[in-house]
Amino acid sequence: MKNSVYILEDRAILYINGIDAKDFLQNLISNDINKVSENFSCFASLLTPQGKFLYEFIVIKHKSGYFVDCEKSQSEEIFKQLNTYKIRSKVEILNLSNEFVVASFGYEKYLSIEGSKDILGYTFKYREDPIILDPRNKGLGARLIINLEKLYLSLKKLDLKDDKIEKYYNESHKLGIVPKNLNQLQNKIFGIECNYEELNGIDFKKGCYIGQENTARIKLKNKLSKRLFPIEIISGVLHNNETIKINDNEIGKVVVSKDYPFAIIKIAEKNFNFENNFKCGNATIKIKKPNWLNKI
């Protein structure tokens, strides 16, 4: 429904403020913080020094600082990690999850709101609160970051009707974008294997950040032999870390098994074909190729 809105109760909002906030984030995240302004937000990740996935989030300029829209189950870890890196930086890091909420609604509805533009990541204010066209993919619609006390009045004025969050998760999974349970990916795969280049989450022209060296090496040497893909379960039950095989050859491994499953797949395997069904433990599955992933 065009007027459906999903209250993303599994999301958290951190706030990074202070005179060093911009440089602080620039030295850590995979995207270029210089792109972020009152009218543009970015998708980014925080990686290990080896370039493996730790956390992902959307960064939104708000007043003198930055909102960080992240998965709630990871928010305390991100908060602690950022404070670890703070050292002498003049930065304040706050967890505002009890005050702010993320509401998501469709692309068509977004375009109908005065002030919107059809540009991924475009950001404008509805009253004082940012509305963002999801910087990853238009299929994820737009997000409103708003104080909890104002939420339902604003939704009423925007003519948005609360709908089941599972519909949002299902749509995200169909698109091939992990909607939740991101902690199951931690330290298992490289950030670039999460399709972050195609989801506008990596800037290869910016300077150093944590994990940049390996990320750039994989890109420059065209060594990206594995990618993250959504799985459709045809029969059986999936378990984390189970191998996916063609005959007796392992071509991948389940990395997110719960609710909305994903696997890391060796796309270079010569016998691999998206049309095939695959065995994984006692399950039969199909590996789905997102429409936006047209390089392979």
Image: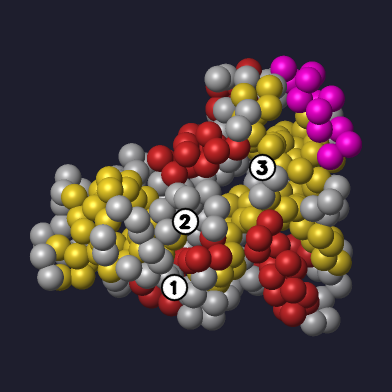
Is residue 21 visible in this depiction of the protein? yes
Q: Is residue 97 above or below residue 158?
A: below
Residue at image position (69%, 70%) is 77
| Kind of residue at badge 3 | Leu
Tell whether position 286 is magenta: no
Q: Which mark is residue 8?
A: 3
Please rate how many residues cluster around mark 1, counting C-alpha atoms within 10 Å: few if below 14, some from 14 to 19, many from 20: some
Quadrant of res 161: top right
Q: Residue 41 appears at what percent x and percent y?
A: 65, 46
Residue situated in front as seen by the camera: 97 or 60: 97
Main SS, magenta region, reads helix
Q: Secondary structure at mark 1?
A: loop
Q: Is residue 93 left or right of residue 39?
A: right
Q: Is residue 205 left or right of residue 220?
A: right
The magenta span reads 148-159
Residue situated in front as seen by the camera: 84 or 181: 181
Q: Do the numbered discs 1 and 3 sit on residues whose CB atoms are within 8 Å?
A: no
Distance between mark 1 and mark 3 Cα atoms: 26 Å
Q: Residue 133 appears at what percent x and percent y?
A: 60, 36
| Kind of residue at badge 2 | Lys
Please rate how many residues cluster around mark 2, counting C-alpha atoms within 10 Å: few if below 14, some from 14 to 19, many from 20: few
Q: Do the numbered discs 1 and 2 sit on residues whose CB atoms are within 8 Å?
A: no
Q: Which mark is residue 229?
A: none
Quadrant of res 122: top right
Q: Which mark is residue 258?
A: 2
Query: Is the image coloured rainbow, by chain, by secondary structure, or in one colour?
Result: secondary structure
